[in-house]
Image (spheres, rainbow, N blue to C red):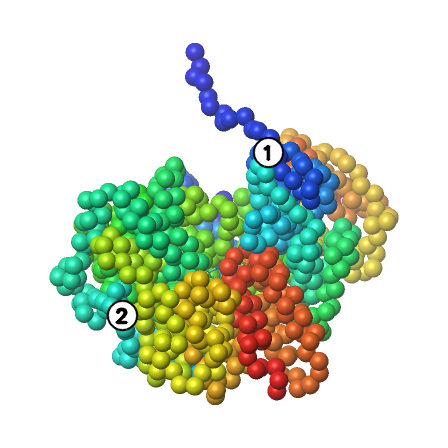
Amino acid sequence: MAEAVFVGLPKRFVSLSIDGREVEVLEGSTILDACRRLEVDTPTLCQLDNLTPVNVCRVCVVEVEGARVLVPACSRRVEAGMKVRTDSERVRHSRRLVLELLGSSVDMSLCSAQVRGWMERYGAVPERFGVGAATVAQPVKVDNELYVRDYSRCILCYKCVEACGVDAQNTFAIGVAGRGFDAHISTEFDTPLPDSACVYCGNCIGVCPTGALMFKSEHDMRGAGTWDEGRQSVTETVCPYCGVGCMLELHVQDNSIVKVTSPLDHSVTSGHLCVKGRFGFEFVQRRKG
Amino acid sequence: MDIRTTGGPATDVEMAAVDGLLGDPEPVDHRVAYGGRAVRSLRHLLLPVLHAIQDRTGWVSRGALEYACRRLSIPPAEAYGVVSFYARFAHEPRDAKVVHVCDDIVCSLAGANAVEGAIRVPCLGLCDRAPASLVERFGADYQAVQMPETPPHVVAGVQLLRRVGVVDPESIESYRAHGGFAGLQRAREIGREAVIAMVSEAKLLGRGGAAFPTGRKWESVAKAQAQPHYLVCNADESEPGTFKDRVLMENDPFAVVEAMAIAAFATGCERGYIYVRDEYPLARRRIGKAISQSRELLGVELEVRRGAGAYICGEETALFNSIEGKRGEPRNKPPFPVEVGLFGKPTLVNNVETLLNVLDIVNGDFGDTRIFCVSGRVSRPGVYEVPMGTPLRSLLEIAGAGDIQAVLLGGAAGSFLTADQIDVALSFEGTRAIGATLGSGAVIVFDETADMKEVLLRIARFFRDESCGQCVPCRVGTKRQEEILERMFTERDGDRSADVMLLSDIAQAMRDASICGLGQTAANAIASGLTQLKVLNG
Ligand SMILES: Cc1cc2nc3c(=O)[nH]c(=O)nc-3n(C[C@H](O)[C@H](O)[C@H](O)COP(=O)(O)O)c2cc1C
Ligand code: SF4
Ligand code: SF4
Ligand code: SF4
Ligand code: FES
Ligand code: FES
């Protein structure tokens, strides 16, 4: 007879209060999960459902009764009886400052409308630090045909490093180098991508929230002023290269594929692809000439 | 994982430095896979390997780093992240002799050394002999010397400091002759629970800065289910103005080692590490010798680990990452070290001075004292051990302070007191009552001639340099704090209330939303300086 296997105790529900409203979530959930359950919109920059929380951006902080400092909603696990405030003066202050500090040092103009919405909600005015405020501005790195890295737009959310590492790709071509305000994403000794371990899966592009990592096609079209999301359509298909069955979203403008993504919540890909699915689309648009 | 290296081969000397630590590589057989779990488990040797390379050659070249990566199965991009994190690793070739000159608060007051081509570094923990420097000679017989070499410091104390200058720090017989190892023996006689009970009853509070009850910590580690348990003695001592742990380690190293053995025994630790900042070569050597001379007595495997120039690695979770061979980035808490610490296991972290107290507790002669490091404008700078609750005024008198403009209590993470506040009692409660903290025990004295603007700017620069860069409030906040302060002190006129407001906005966010104590305290001294000192009226 087969031996019994211990699979752990069944999970229980934990109840806590968020802004005075009671909510029940499974134990092991984060405060962010609980907020989402109550549809309390919580800003996040370094959190993504398919990556391990690094809790570094601190824009998601909330006030937990009894705690000396604010806690990151994205990674703090719920505890029974926790009393959480997501809109106190302290919370609003820190969220505003995080957005202002980032906005004053990084080019956030390609961030999503959602991020701009948070800026507005918390009254963030990045300009108030004055014109002399140091930024991370630097030349765009264009060193290969597939994607470009514009670290002037990098908020150092660690997502690309996680995607390139154990959370998805296991290639470890990039890491965080330097420290303090000089900390930055880098290959070893800042070597160009073609000389690095990069395999061009593009999974880092897929998770980057700021446009710092971008398909070269998109970068070139933006440079030429022809990039126009209004004129783009998205076609869903399955990657033809192998038997895994990754779902692709082909972004098409003027009858040309300009970028390829995969949905983060897709059961096969979790948003991650390989170089073939991500960049191997040229043959489709090879026209007889 | 596929390790791709393109930096060219390492030199024979570099390879020998790495192999000297790791042993000779196995002969290459391309039919057999190399790496896997066995090799990856050596990751924690990355910092020791980098030190071995740099000691030999003066820097860490790309070829050498990649050779180390192949031997330890570490992706080069990640190893580069580690090398570039620590201030003491160079990735450019250097001369065989390098001089590091301290330009921090106390040494600047003393007119910091001007040495051509020297590297300017934060506090070297030699403030009692300011101006201080550290001289390194690279090569097969690597040497690091703390300057000035002759210690003119005052060591005053009858409890924790009583063996300093009395025992021979390199001789176990001398230590035994002064009652050494009686505490460890007694601990074994009375048993774990009794030892922990004694520590709890003594109400000992941690001396590393956070003043956490030591007994409670020991109890949690002793009870923790997961195995093994680890012990870490925090000897990173990098808070500007602090040098007491150095004095203890240099002069009474066997006591530190014995105290670690007692802690390991009481909390069931299989292995212990003492993490000594790289700027303390003498302390490191003496502790190492003490461990090897007393190995059979200890009942636990102890190992010295060498920091690499990062104040943040004094933060306990950053310290774990550093021992594990990673960037010294603090971890989010909870989980706390007593549950998930070094290598993910329950870990006891204590400061050097905290552990020394345990020795006296077990021997039944605990005197609740505290060691203060007095430096700056005093005629007798040094370490002074006084009973908890001693008024700051008496301490300043015995150290020979004259007219006082201000005192920085607790180092860069502490706060400024003015002349009319020096009657404060030096206890956790006494300082808390006036919004200050004892912190690391640093007491820096400024007389009327000190330029306090310079001091505030130096503190702002310190935090900007030492922030690990992980979280936004601290990474950008410390940068903005420095910029705004510079602007306030250089622009002649104009309304400064807007800048004061900005600083206080940043301070609140750093305090509330930073991951660790560095960001949470990075505005303290500056905020107290701006309100307490006359820096804005001229
Ligand atoms: C930025 C920072 C630096 C620190 N540096 C040190 C240090 O050099 N030595 C030390 O013992 N504790 C230091 N600490 C405190 C440690 O995190 C920890 O609380 C302490 O080692 C615990 O030991 P204790 O309970 O014996 O005080 C530092 C904390 C922070 C936030
Ligand atoms: S493209 Fe893939 S391999 Fe290259 S850096 Fe990005 S995640 Fe890593
Ligand atoms: S490049 Fe993008 S994903 Fe990577 S850290 Fe910067 S902002 Fe985040
Ligand atoms: S507070 Fe500063 S030092 Fe601490 S984790 Fe954040 S960035 Fe690093
Ligand atoms: S989203 Fe929580 S810290 Fe970044
Ligand atoms: S050694 Fe220079 S300030 Fe401490």
Quarter of the image where ligand 4 sits: bottom right
Q: Is residue A201 left or right of residue B426?
A: right
Give left or right: position of A90 versus A251: left
Vertical comparison of B86 with B113: above or below: above
Residue closest to the eye, B79 or A220: B79
Residue B270 marker: none
Q: Residue at x 63, y 68 (%)?
A: B504
Which amino acid, mark 1? Answer: Val
> Relative to B88, does residue B129 appear above or below in the rendering?
below
Q: Is residue A280 visible?
A: no
Q: Chain of mark 2?
A: B
In the drawing, does residue B136 fall left or right of residue B472?
Answer: left
Mark 2 residue's CB less than 8 Å from ligand 1: no
Q: Secondary structure at mark 1?
A: strand
Mark 1 closeness class: few <14, some 14–19, many ≥20 residues within 10 Å: some
Q: Position of residue B182 (x, y in %)?
A: 17, 54
In the picture as drawn, the residue positioned furthest to the top comes out as: A1
Q: Nearer the viewer, residue B54 or A103?
A: A103
Label 1 to label 2: alpha-carbon separation: 54 Å
Return the residue at label 2: B157
Residue A91 in the image, given as x and y percentages of width and height: 66, 54
Residue at left offset 43%, top offset 86%: B403
Q: Position of residue A54 (x, y in %)?
A: 57, 49
Q: Residue at x 55, y 76 (%)?
A: B532
Between B215 and B506, the one lying in front of the other is B215
Label 2 crowd bin: few (<14), some (14–19), many (20+), radius 10 Å:
some
The residue where tag 1 is placed is: A14
Tag 2: amino acid: Gly
Residue B426 at least partly seen? yes
Residue B524 occupies which quadrant of the picture?
bottom right
Quarter holding the C terminus of chain B is bottom right
> Residue at the location (62% across, 38% down)?
A16
